[in-house]
Amino acid sequence: MFNINFYEAAVRSKVYINGAACISAQKASGNSSFFEEIQSTADNVFWAVEPDYTKLIPAASARRMAKGVKMSVAASKMAIDNAETSILDAIIIGTGLGCKIDSDKFVSAIIDSSEEFLTPTPFIQSTHNTVAGQIALGMKCTGYNNTYVHGSVSFESALLDAKLQLENNEAASILVGGVDELTEHTLKIHEKIKHIKFERIDSSQLLRSKSEGTIFGEGASFFITSNQKNINCYAELAAIEIINTLSVENLPNNLEAFLKANDLHVDEIDLAVLGNNGDAKFDVYFHTLADGMLNKINRIYYKHLCGEFFTASAFGFWLASKILKLQIIPEVAKMGEIAPSEIKNILLYNQYRGENHSFVLLKKC
Amino acid sequence: MSDLKQELKAKIIEQLNLEDVTISEIDDNDSLFGDGLGLDSIDALELIVMLDKDYGIRLSDPKEGKKIFESVQVMADYIEANRTK
Amino acid sequence: MGKGVAITGMGIISAIGINTEENFQALIHKKNGISKIELLDTAHKNEIMVGEIKLTNAQLEAPLDLPSNNNYTRTAMLGSIAAKQAISNANIFNISKYRTGLVSSTSVGGMDMTEKYFYDYLSESDSQKYITSHPAGDSTQKIAEQLGISQSLVTTISTACSSAANAIMLGARLIKAGKLDRVIVGGTDSLSKFTINGFKTLMILSDTHSAPFDENRNGLNLGEGAAYLVLESDEIVEKEHKKVLAYVKGYGNANDAFHQTASSENGDGATLAMEKALKVAGMLPSQIDYVNVHGTATGNNDLSEGRALIRVFGNTIPGFSSTKAFTGHTLAAAGAVEAVFSVLALQHNIIFPNLNFETPMKEFHLLPQTETKNKELNAVLSNSFGFGGNCSTLIFTKQP
């Protein structure tokens, strides 16, 4: 009598993106412009351009928030406004490194002060689920609340969780976000191990680089997902696949299996959004698809616009959602010539340093 | 004494990141928590560290802070009476 | 009938034992694992009591047979040890025979190495191999490698002290949705200066043995550990004639939306989480035979959780106990550690004792189980709450 059998439901609901907002290094933040002006960097790092928070976050709550939390709270509000909704059943966040600013602050204080006179704020704020908790607290949202922290599939894990709940009608509207913030320490140590390129390059030339490593970035991309399509609908989230390890050789079969599971032939993909980051060592994954299976498919990339970070793929997801809605492909993102035609199906593929691969399929709604 | 109160106000603003508050806005007898300055339990923990670090006063129970941090005036009186540095 | 989620194996390493049997024996014989800090190098060594696993990193590393240049953190090693036990306990010899995923959890990931080498990372040195061990997902990737899980769904959850409960929940949902046939779920956390100093700034660390649900409780003992469970679908259980230890019958996740670190006075989030779990399980509160409470022994948690218990169960509160006075609070791992204890309780029909309880709290008359008690158990409810208002509840049953 009490048994709620979500999983036996005859029809699984479709999942839609009804609202979106992105804070990144580009001024295309929010929803007002779409790459009318391009920011580039020559320092191998893209810092996110922050919006005016005064209208988005009460001063009393903002005073303890580091950049990542502020960007997230702001982006979540913008996404909610964009979807013209006020009801949220769940909040699910993906963040690869979590609240790194406060984490670095607390670790260095422990060492510098020999464990004396430490204050609680950086510790409290360093917790990986600070973002999800702060958003819930700010909105008084007592629903499901979760945080995924798994490298470059942190955001996709959050998406997958949301999709499972929406499909099975456990929830009707879910806020899903991807966020990461940079610190000077993060930059310095990743330069040491060559995850950031040694030589300085211009971000617009990212894919021409022949060296190992990439350029780093940060940002927050938030979405309202729902099993009800609204008038603002960006896209239908058709499928997500997360794969921990994958060899270059096995990549094509895995993509094929993913498409097959979703009744799609490769020719039906109108646009592929690839996570190339200019790392000569690992971009071979993307090249394998670009030179092979996706050779005849229109392709775009985005990490020359936002930099690499564990949730950079959420920026790619925002870009793809926006493209589906506007039916415009920003010139700056194109890889080669793209013939204009209707965009119905977009495939996203990302991986970082050969690990934590993801396929995402978005459809026009 | 009034120097100490000024000092405390400046420290409270800085340590607790009260960006939109100025020293002149805090009255000696304003309540720091609740309706006054609106501080909360995390701020109380921050102030406990400040007492320890700057004035050599160590509290073992956070509940003791409640009375001590009632206002800048009460705080200053307590520090004057108990400081070890 | 909906799809069942069977638990077919489990593994654990904690301050009270390096395997399931040792943990069980300690629990029934009231042998706690709380001590002064011996292995971790911290200024607070003599001030606090913790649940420390008395094995050095070198001792943990030995059975894992790792290359000498490995960059396993203590968190990754503890996790690997417990997860391997779980696989072996479930008699899994060919892990890729079925679609198998891993959902792990951790609070601070590779912080144990980061806090050691934070500044060393900046100069050329051997320590730099640990830079990539810092992100929370790293320990999970390593555990997957240890288990031979490749080309599969592997992810990590971090919701502070409720992390592993959420990992178990996601695993159960992935099986119910038919996304995977088998999911290894759990959590791992090692003691670190970061968490010790962090909890110290909150002034909630006990200088003695913690006393959950006691009027005179004075804070928690931190602990370290890892625990993993193997969840399998009905199809695998049937095909392989698997022995089922218990079922994940219900789960609920809610947010208290009250305060960043403290629980609401009346346990709103905790109440919601328990109610949701009962609803998903299709059970009435009266069908719960034992509650393994979160029970950290902080002033705030036990009061809030106690009130939530009264709200959910009314006047007939089932036997309950906190096992944290045995293991210490193992943070992200706690939900999995206590899931293993809940399954052990079901298997042996035993309610584990709540150590160090003497005086009932003045706000209500709640008496935890203080002695090992034999009782027929069919359903056990386990709570895990964390910072950020995260509240999660799991229900384990004997029957599907």
Image (spheres, rainbow, N blue to C red):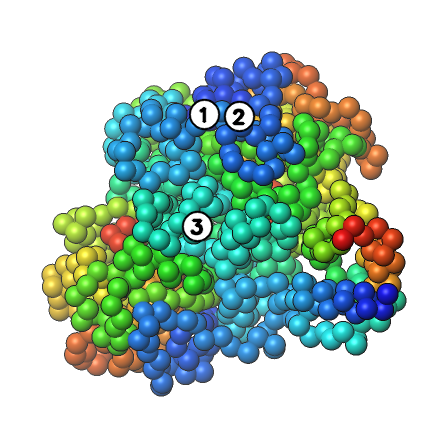
For image coordinates 25% across by 72% down, the residue present is A201
* Residue under label 1: C55
Q: Amino acid at mark 1?
A: Leu
Q: Mark 2–mark 3 contact, CB under 8 Å?
A: no
Mark 2–mark 1 Cα distance, whole angstroms, equals 10 Å
For image coordinates 69% across by 53% down, the residue present is B53
In the picture, which quadrant includes the C terminus of chain A? bottom left
Determine the chain carrying the residue at label 3. Answer: C
Query: Which of marks 3 and 2 precedes in the sequence?
Result: 2
Left or right for C214, reference A198: right
Q: On screen, A137 above or below C273?
A: below
The residue nearer to you, when weighing C327 against A31, is C327
Left or right for C204, reference C360: left
Q: On screen, C61 above or below A260?
A: above
From the top left corner, tell me how far across and down residue A96 is, in percent: 41, 55
From the top left corner, tell me how far across and down residue C265 is, in percent: 75, 47
Which numbered disc, 2 or 3, marks the residue closer to the eye?
Answer: 3
The numbered dot on residue C15 is 2
For image coordinates 22% across by 75% down, the residue present is A205
Determine the chain carrying the residue at label 2. Answer: C
Q: Are marks 2 and 3 on the same chain?
A: yes
Q: Are marks 2 and 1 on the same chain?
A: yes
* Residue under label 3: C118
The residue nearer to you, when weighing C188 against B50, is B50
- Residue A75 in view (yes/no): yes
Q: Amino acid at mark 2?
A: Ala
| Disc 3 secondary structure class | loop
| Disc 2 secondary structure class | loop
The numbered dot on residue C28 is none
